[in-house]
Amino acid sequence: MSRLLIFGLGYTSRAIAARLETRGWRVVGTTRDGRGGSIAFADRDRVRFEAGQATAILSSVPPDGEGDPVLTNYRELLAGPTLAYLSSTGVYGDAGGGWVDESTPIAGRRANRNAADRAWLDLGARVFRLPGIYGPGRSPLDRVAAGEAHRVDCPGQVFSRVHVADVAKGVTYGLSAEPGSYNLSDDLPASQNAVVEYAARLLGVAPPPFVAIETLSPMARAFYGENRRVANGKAKRMLGWQPDYPDYRFGLRALSATTSPASASAAPAPASGDQR
């Protein structure tokens, strides 16, 4: 039986676990405090045991101010199993609206994320670089319905994004692929305003108002300070992966048809700005 140890059971890694479990994998994972039947990250004996049983290890733990917690605390357990790491397309930095791919130099604004991405590649991991992730309970539909969405007057600004189910699909394919970096993004980079407006149209409400970029938080202003389109051709060629939701319209229509937008209190905690 294939066995996966996940460091950091969060929104995206739980979707990965669910997909693999339907394919016969045994999956265990860590959280900070061991909630919900998971393993506490600091439980070294249990982590060491599960790592010894694992055929693959996946980390979705982002770096903190001290570096990568998994590499700092458990590097000695990583030799042997297939390794995978959920990184961020933020490692590419600002491209002035141009396209980036896996050959683009790492020049992101977060030095610790850049260093973690390189370190996992050096260990022979499959490094999945992810843009803005959305899906059930965490999408523009939920933010519009909760009155938390806004538009920003920032002409020419585009972002890439990906449905969480397509991340799970790509990682599943990637676990048997060659080590290296893979961008998992949809086929249509678009402005945040266009996505929010489409979500409002699906909900039958007026689009939210514009706000001045100066009124945003420092993290949000930094988000709008980067402008890039993420190419996914390598993942398609090397993994045989195709997104089931090739652009935000497919993804939001599917979510609108199958779920009711969650309230702000019921939605999962937002992803860190470092892995958007």
Image (cartoon, rainbow, N blue to C red):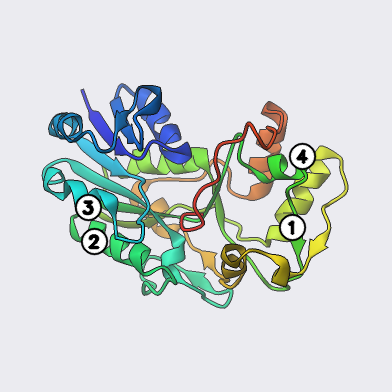
Image location (x, y in percent) of residue 242:
48, 45
The residue indicated by pointer 2 is: 119
Task: Kindly report the distance in space between the C-alpha atoms of the residues bearing marks 4 and 1.
Answer: 16 Å
The residue at 47%/69% (across/down) is 100
Camera-near label (1 vs 2) is 2
Disc 1 + disc 2, Cβ < 8 Å: no
Q: Earlier in the sequence, mark 3 or mark 4?
A: 3
Residue in the foreground of this view, choosing between 53 and 250 = 53
Q: Position of residue 85 (x, y in %)?
A: 32, 49
Mark 1 or 3, which is nearer the eye? Answer: 3
Marking on residue 145: 4
Identify the element where label 2 is drawn.
Answer: helix
User: What amino acid type is highlighted by mark number 1?
Assistant: Ala
The answer to whether residue 10 is above or below residue 65 is above
> Of label 1 and label 2, which has the lower sequence position?
2
Q: Is residue 8 visible?
A: yes
Residue type, mark 3 in image: Leu
Name the residue nearer the viewer: 218 or 5: 218
The residues bearing labels 2 and 4 have C-alpha atoms spaced at a distance of 40 Å
Give the residue pinned by disc 1: 194
| Residue pointed to by mark 3 | 71
Upstream in sequence: badge 2 or badge 3: 3
**Mark with earlier residue (1, 3):** 3
Kindly indicate whether the residue at mark 4 contacts the one at mark 3 (C-beta within 8 angstroms). Answer: no
Residues at marks 3 and 4, CA–CA distance in whole angstroms: 39 Å
Q: In this orientation, which residue lies closer to the viewer: 107 or 268?
A: 268
Give amino acid for label 2.
Answer: Ala
**Mark 1: which secondary structure?**
helix
Question: Do the numbered discs 2 and 3 sit on residues whose CB atoms are within 8 Å?
Answer: yes
When the figure is inspected, residue 91 is found, relative to residue 9, above or below; the finding is below
